[in-house]
Amino acid sequence: VQLQASGGGSVQAGGSLRLSCAVPGHTFRNYNIGWLRQAPGKEREFVGGIRWGGRGTYYANSVRGRFTISRDNAKNTVDLLLNSLKPEDTAVYYCAAGTTSKVLSTLLTPGGYDYWGQGTQVTVSS
């Protein structure tokens, strides 16, 4: 399973960014796809995800209402729209795939994901 994240950049607080993860159709139909992030000096943390085949989305409390995950079937991507960005959102963002056997509680942690793409840097200045 190969994944590739893109779309990071620098933005001021309150701004928006859209990250994309290239996810082929067969991968999207057979794996849960998550977005996770790691800030300097901190552990990797879950941000949000979409269940296999698009059976619903789920988010960390810290981003719910600000970030939105969606699937673009035309582009074969899973996108993460980041709105109302805060300096504490600064991190390297990763997309990852987890097998369908994982329960939701596990999918809310990095342990719910088996395959990881390269990260993309998001920097939010105050």
Image (spheres, grey):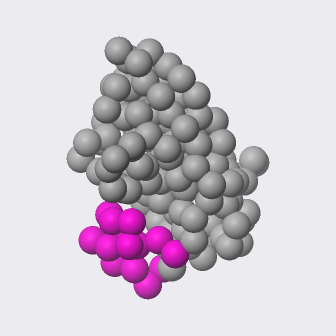
Q: Is residue 28 magenta?
A: no
Badge count: 0
Please name the residue shown 53% across and 28% down the image.
Answer: 17
Image quadrant of residue 19?
top right
Please name the residue shown 33% across and 56% down the image.
Answer: 43
User: Quarter of the image containing the C terminus?
Assistant: top left
Image quadrant of residue 104?
bottom left
In the shown orientation, is residue 82 left or right of residue 19? Answer: left
Say if 31 sits above or below 61 in the image.
below
Q: Is residue 105 magenta?
A: yes
Q: Position of residue 63 (x, y in %)?
A: 31, 40
Residue 71 appears in view: no
* Magenta extent: 100-114
Q: Position of residue 106 (x, y in %)?
A: 32, 73
Please name the residue shown 41% across and 34% down the image.
Answer: 90
Please name the residue shown 63% across and 49% down the image.
Answer: 5
Residue 114 appears in view: yes
Q: In this view of the protein, which residue sits in the foreground, 11 or 32?
A: 11
Q: In this view of the protein, which residue sits in the foreground, 116 or 75?
A: 116
Image quadrant of residue 110?
bottom left
In the shown orientation, is residue 28 left or right of residue 16? Answer: right
Say if 103 sits above or below 12 in the image.
below
Q: Residue furthest left?
A: 61
Say if 89 sits above or below 44 in the image.
above
User: Quarter of the image containing the N terminus?
Assistant: bottom right
Q: Residue furthest front?
A: 41
Q: Position of residue 121 (x, y in %)?
A: 55, 38
In the shown orientation, is residue 91 left or right of residue 31? Answer: left
Q: Residue furthest bottom?
A: 101
Q: Position of residue 79 (x, y in %)?
A: 58, 44
Q: In this view of the protein, which residue sits in the foreground, 40 or 111?
A: 40
Say if 87 sits above or below 50 in the image.
above
